[in-house]
Amino acid sequence: MTLKEKIIRKSAKIGIMGLGYTGLPLAVEFSKAGFDVTGIEIDKDKVRMINQGKCYIRDVKQSELEELVKNNRLEATVDFSVLKKMDAISICVPTPLRKTKDPDISYILNAVEEIAKNLHKGQLIVLESTTYPGTTREIVLPKLASKKFLVGKDFYLAFSPERTDPGNKEYTLRSTPKIVSGITKKCTSIAVTLYEQIIDEVVPVSTTESAEMVKLLENTFRIVNVGLINEIALICDRLKLDTWEVIDAAATKPFGFMPFYPGPGLGGHCVPVDPHYLSWKLKALNFYARFIELAGEINIKMPEFLLSKIDAALNERKKSIKGSKILILGVAYKSNVSDARESPALDVMRLLKERGGKVVYNDPYVPQVEGLKSIHLTRSSLKNADCVVITTAHSDYDYKEIVENARLIIDSRNATKEIKSKKIIKL
Ligand SMILES: NC(=O)c1ccc[n+]([C@@H]2O[C@H](COP(=O)([O-])OP(=O)(O)OC[C@H]3O[C@@H](n4cnc5c(N)ncnc54)[C@H](O)[C@@H]3O)[C@@H](O)[C@H]2O)c1
């Protein structure tokens, strides 16, 4: 039986490397569709939790995961030798930046080395991790192919970028179109068939480089627009205008405008990181990606701008940051998620501590971060704080109650939009 037939009959064995924010939902979706799925993960705790049917990612339903594990549709292992039993393998490992802001593709390299040791005829390998154009062909392919083992004939290789949006209730993995491209036409065709089993619309593009670039365009679009709107916030501040009113009014235009909103900076694992993969690649081609660099410069300054707002508001009340009790609300990088990676709230907390502020935080989704534990949000914790700073607008918060009890609120997300009070200072 060919691999395509195995996929259509759901008898193909699927391996997912990396069971994090993107890999676990993908593994669950394949196994819900009727495939036997094995997650290959280096983190023993995650493997143990999956095999006990315990979920650690909010977007995956605990009951669904439990059911799939109980019915032997989904299992996890730290043993890479299972790769040889797999018919199709998706790689969902991290692609962070080094301190120098250069891409760190070491996780991809490690994963591909393990695949190479276990590669067999007829296997499909799909890289899903976000990376710079050229990675699949220039880095991954040479590690797998040889004169005797040809891509498109003996095995298949494709790139298909992850488009997960954690916390998004409207667009799920299934309802978000998926971009796919293989090294050869046959690779594309098999990878398209694979993803068609779990995704409503699969969009093939002509090359793996194009597919890699699609993801970077999407994230560059966000970083640049967030940078622009953050600069508009700085401009409105100088002009003593209400940024939020200006944006909301502009957004009434039914065409040609798309609202973005300012905030304390840019967070998350993807948007602040991925465009640097592109600018790094372009530097090698003597091209300086100005929009990306400029947006990065503006976004990185936003925590300091928020700090200046806190400083001025306390000063107005004859107080200084030094010695003031400051309660931070929300440390996740965006509302209603538990991921605090690269969150600007952490930068704001660090800056406040450096200035001698007595910083505590509450986040219903993040129980602890950077050596601090989330405190209970009570009337007295609000009343006790010299200043409450809203850094992430979780919808669980009762903003009316917060405004009623806090002495001073610095709202960097317009979460208190519907409430009128002199205690509120907006970004
Ligand atoms: N989180 C998102 O919202 C999101 C959205 C779109 C794209 N992406 C991209 O998807 C990729 C993965 O991101 P993530 O957020 O899922 O990361 P993550 O850190 O949540 O998960 C990655 C997992 O891979 C595991 N891992 C590392 N090396 C491994 C190896 N050699 N073999 C097996 N497992 C290994 C890690 O232990 C971790 O559990 C990145 O390239 C990211 O840019 C993420």
Image (spheres, rainbow, N blue to C red):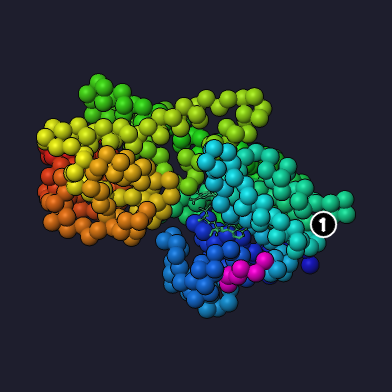
Is residue 43 visible in the rendered image? The answer is: yes
Q: Is residue 289 left or right of residue 365?
A: right
Residue closer to the observer: 222 or 355: 355
Tell me the quadrant of the picture where the N terminus can be found.
bottom right
Query: Which amino acid, mark 1?
Result: Asp
Residue at left offset 54%, top offset 46%: 96
| Residue 93 belongs to magenta span | no
Q: Is mark 1 within 8 Å of ligand 1?
A: no
Above or below 304: residue 377:
below
Residue 277 location, quadrant: top right
Position of residue 388 measured from the top left corner of the image (x, y, whole percent) = 20, 46
Residue at left offset 58%, top offset 38%: 102
Residue closer to the observer: 420 or 405: 405
| Residue 78 belongs to magenta span | yes
Residue closer to the observer: 195 or 392: 392
Is residue 174 visible in the rendered image? The answer is: no
Which quarter is ligand 1 in? Answer: bottom right
Residue at left offset 46%, top offset 32%: 296
Q: Label 1 crowding class (10 Å Cα cut-off): few <14, some 14-19, many 20+? A: some
Q: Is residue 337 left or right of residue 403?
A: right
Highlighted range, magenta = 75-80
Position of residue 281 measured from the top left corner of the image (x, y, whole percent) = 63, 34
Residue position marked by numbered label 1 in the rendering: 154
Above or below 157: residue 79:
below
Position of residue 387 measured from the top left corner of the image (x, y, whole percent) = 18, 44
Tell me the quadrant of the picture where the C terminus can be found.
top left
Secondary structure found at label 1: loop
